[in-house]
Image (tube, grey):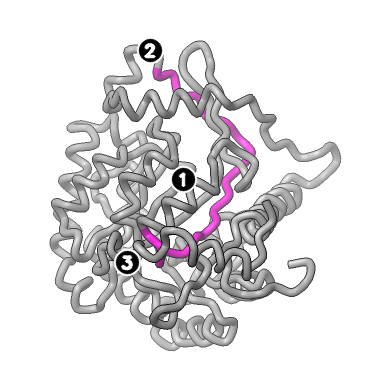
Amino acid sequence: MQLTRRNFLTSLAAGSLGTAASLMPSPLHAAPPAAPAGSLLPTALGIDNFAVRAFGWKAPELIAYAESLQLDTLFLSDIECLPSLESAALRDVKAQADSAGLALYIGSWSICPTSTRFKPTWGTAEEHLRTGIRVSKALGSPVFRVILGTMDDRKTPGGIKARMEDTIKVLKDCRGDAMDAGIKIAIENHAGDMHSWELIELIERAGPEFVGVNIDSGNAAWTLEDPTDLLERLGPYTICSSLRDDMIWSTPEGASIQWTAIGEGLIDWSRYMDRWRALCPNVPFQIETISGFARQFPYKTDAFWEHYDRNPEALAKFETLAAQGHAVEPFKAAGGLDKKEAEKAFQKAELERSVTYCRKVLGLGRRDPKPGV
């Protein structure tokens, strides 16, 4: 289905978006940029810089690239891509983004001091979080995205519950800093670390007035959850996003999962966006394609469930999705091509196909792009 902006806006006016405001917990959502009162705008469209990680670009190059695609937002999900964290350098980055018409979203990595993924690059977990809050405020980001860790943390002493406790303590210690700055902390469902219901528990205990979700549709499958089912649970808490498609197929021991460009996997994006507009309508749709490899999940073995929660209803929906999938070939550089250059071309193509799909099929984005963009 091809949607023009006029047809898209007409369909919104005739549909259920008018009820979205009553469904949205206002303290958790920020629009990029704010829509005029009473207007109906398409969902803002952006990209996560990790989608083109092979290029090693810093913020100025990433802003220029996002501007060339005529996007609405740019998610700098790793503060290491900033040339400097000094105030003058941050002002320059913000000025460039403002000139390009881009709203910036800012992020970094683990704030769980006992996670296998925590690094002391920015000091203690609390120092890391406070640095991110300061940087986010300087760059005009309404959120600072962080993670707990990965699925490996489920196997650490005390399991994921112990890591959640440690993360909650860090968040509470920095609550005043976040509230004073007006910055929400967006915790991602990252790499199989927390099930959606565990992430909700973390947010509710830490403080939903300043903590929300960075929703990742690809990572949903790594906790054996249907991405649309996960959106139903996490949507009301969602304040930021990193999105891609999933291809899942059944195997004798469980399932294989390979992420894909948007529109090339199993997610019903039309249905997904209907729920998005009802649950988190002011959150931008930010693409983070990470494709080219499959991961095995042997959930039909007893050993697997030593570290994961068995939720029969969620698992049944995941298995229904997996029954529709098929194996996907992993990425391989063509013979004779430099591997690094092949990775760059692959990542760029995956991302740009996704941008095109989001615009032409889903009607996302607030700009009228030039021909060929």
What residue does disc 3 label? 21
Residue kind at label 1, given as amino acid type: Ser
Answer left or right for 238 relative to 264: left
How many residues crowd mark 3 within 10 Å: few (<14), some (14–19), many (20+)?
Answer: some
Q: Residue at left 59%, top 56%?
A: 362
Residue with the most extreme right position: 336
Nearer-the-camera pick, 209 or 161: 209
Query: For numbered disc 1, what is the local secondary structure?
Result: helix
Q: Which residue is mark 1?
A: 217
Quarter of the figure with residue 358: bottom right
Q: Is residue 340 above or below residue 34?
A: above
283 inside magenta stretch? yes
The correct choice, above or below, for 95 with respect to 339 in the image is below
Point out which mark residue 301 bears: 2
In the rendered structure, the answer to whether residue 320 lies left or right of residue 96 reads left
Q: CA distance from mark 2 to mark 3?
A: 44 Å
Task: Kindly report the distance in space between the C-alpha atoms of the residues bearing marks 1 and 2.
Answer: 25 Å
Circle count: 3
Nearer the N terminus, badge 1 or badge 2?
A: 1
